[in-house]
Amino acid sequence: MTWRRALAYWACFLGLVVYDRAVERRPAGEAVHVVRAPLLNVEANRIDAVELRRDDRIVRCRRVDGRWQVTAPAGGSAPADLIAALVTNITELPDVDVVAENSTDLAQFGLDKPATEMTLTPGGGTPISVRLGNRNPSGTAVYAQRSGSDRVYLIGLNVRYYEDLLFEAVGPQGRGS
């Protein structure tokens, strides 16, 4: 490596440092505040029923004698462990990022017409609905919104993965139920 090339690299590095300090950095008093909160406050073992709606397809599942089974569409079936994994994954999420506190433009998250609406019913409790929208720009997570909340959350893709597997396992008979 020549001295000129080394000097050019150092000049570029120093230029980037100056740019970062002058333009990209926030003023000293302005900190980035990331809000993290739980999506749901219910344990998986308290959920007795789950319903998923996607387009014109509906899948209903119920826990019977401690095992999950598909109750609708008629003749539909899926592994009990798959349903249990979906319920566990949505209920036992650690605190997740809140990307909007009171968004009036839900279309940017795909929540104006959600890809999937999931309703979880705890035994003896009020049903809890979760709407799942688009993936985030990097494709690593999904936007979600819980019933009774204006917050928009960003949750991992596992929930979408398990719901896709459930719809696939039940097959096409889940239309228009």
Image: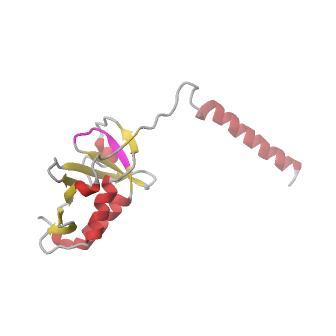
Q: Quadrant of the C terminus?
A: bottom left
Q: Position of residue 102 (x, y in %)?
A: 31, 35
Q: Please, which residue is most extreme toward the right here?
A: 3
| Placement of 53 over or under 124, stated as above or below | below
Q: Position of residue 145 (x, y in %)?
A: 29, 46
Q: Please, which residue is most extreme toward the top here?
A: 29
Q: Quadrant of the N terminus?
A: bottom right
Q: Position of residue 144 (x, y in %)?
A: 31, 48
> Residue at position x 26%, y 50% from top?
131
Q: Does any portion of residue 69 appear in the rendered image? A: yes
Q: Nearer the viewer, residue 168 or 64?
A: 64
Q: Is residue 135 left or right of residue 20?
A: left
Q: Quadrant of residue 169?
A: bottom left
Q: Point out the stretch of residues depicted in magenta.
A: 148-154
58 drawn magenta: no
152 drawn magenta: yes
Q: Please, which residue is most extreme toward the front here?
A: 65
Q: Nearer the viewer, residue 84 or 150?
A: 84
Q: Position of residue 137 (x, y in %)?
A: 43, 51
Q: Quadrant of residue 103?
A: top left
> Residue at position x 22%, y 44% from top?
147
Q: How many marks do you count on the picture? A: 0
> Residue at position x 26%, y 73% from top?
79
> Residue at position x 73%, y 42% from top?
13
